[in-house]
Amino acid sequence: MSTVPPALAAAVGPLPEGVELPLPPAFDSVEEERRYRKEQLAAGFRIFGRFGFSEGVAGHITVRDPGDPNAFWVNPFGMSFGQIKASDLILVDHEGTVLEGRRPVNRAAFVIHSRVHAARPDAIAAAHSHSLHGKAFSSLGIPLDPITQDACAFFEDHGIYDDYRGVVNETEEGERVAKALGDHKAVILKNHGLLTVGHSVAEAVWWFVTMERSCQAQLLAMAAGTPQLIDRETALLTRGQVGGHLAGWFQARPLWDQITASDPDLFD
């Protein structure tokens, strides 16, 4: 039998001989990895658009440039998530200087993401938007509870930023957001929305999608009655099974397959 990575063993049964699961790719050059990250980022925006996570010009996903850890790729300001191509992406450094691209950058994207990337060298990608259930849940100022298997991915692994001061325009506030994130995979921005990070674009996007849905599930459960919590020991066990970096990357595969099949122009 082929070997199943330990991080996926809880979800995958024995593999037939010669069958291998898809895994994050390795690259022979910085240029090859840069192209891959940009294509993943464009696909991530298309997925956000498909889920209806856009709200006017708000929202941004970023990925660190593999050749310059102090620079990241981000969406052009004011461009629809559903139309973004890899060639449209903007490269900006941590000081806000546009290094490559033909359009301006959302200042809030720079302020938040530059501080998150600076504080978290392990965070290759970060995702934020004003999704409906995420911003509704954020107004409560409470953490996600372990009421479902999916929510357990965030059990004791997300922060709360509770100092909303309007549209984020100053790097000092970006630093406070990064501090609230800490070493977690996500942070709930009170009265604002959700932000997730990952070791890949796919992971960060998946955490955002499933956190948004977990917020929706908890809101529905609270409206219907009193949700019953999963006990701490089981919640931590489940987080170990579904909340790791490889599990996050792998969970995003069906979304990537669907969006790259339906939107091949994103690679342009």
Image: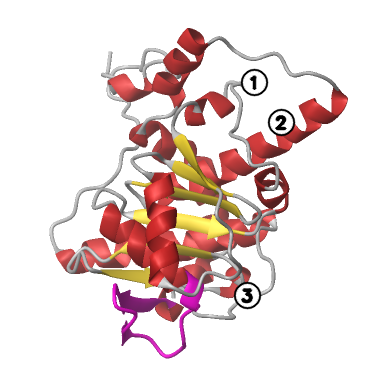
Check disc 1: other Cα within 10 Å, few if <14, some if 14-19, many if 20+.
some
Asked whether the viewer can see residue 35, the reply is: yes
Residue 102 is one of the magenta-drawn residues: yes
Q: Secondary structure at mark 2?
A: helix
Residue farthest along the bottom direction in this orientation: 102
Taking the image as shown, residue 93 lies to the left or right of residue 214, namely left
Label 3 Cα neighbours within 10 Å, binned few <14 / some 14-19 / many ≥20? some
**Does the image show residue 39?**
no
Label ID, residue 136: none
Q: Which residue carries the number 3 mark? A: 57
Q: Position of residue 27 (x, y in %)?
A: 18, 54
Does the residue at mark 1 contact the one at mark 2 (Cβ under 8 Å)? yes
**Of 81 and 68, which appears nearest the observer?**
68
Front-most of 8 and 72? 72
50 in relation to 170, above or below: above
Tag 3: amino acid: Val
Q: Amino acid at mark 2?
A: Gln
Q: Nearer the viewer, residue 159 or 264?
A: 159
Indicate which disc residue 147 carries: 1
Kindly identify which residue carries mark 2: 218
Q: Residue at x 43, y 47 (%)?
A: 180
Q: Residue at x 41, y 79 (%)?
A: 87
Which of the two labelled residues, at mark 1 and mark 2, occupies the earlier sequence position?
1
148 vs 253: above or below: above
Comes first in the chain, label 3 or label 1: 3
Image quadrant occupied by the C terminus? bottom left
* Residue occupying the point 39% across, 70% down: 171
- Indicate whether residue 99 is drawn in magenta: yes
Q: Which residues are magenta?
A: 89-108
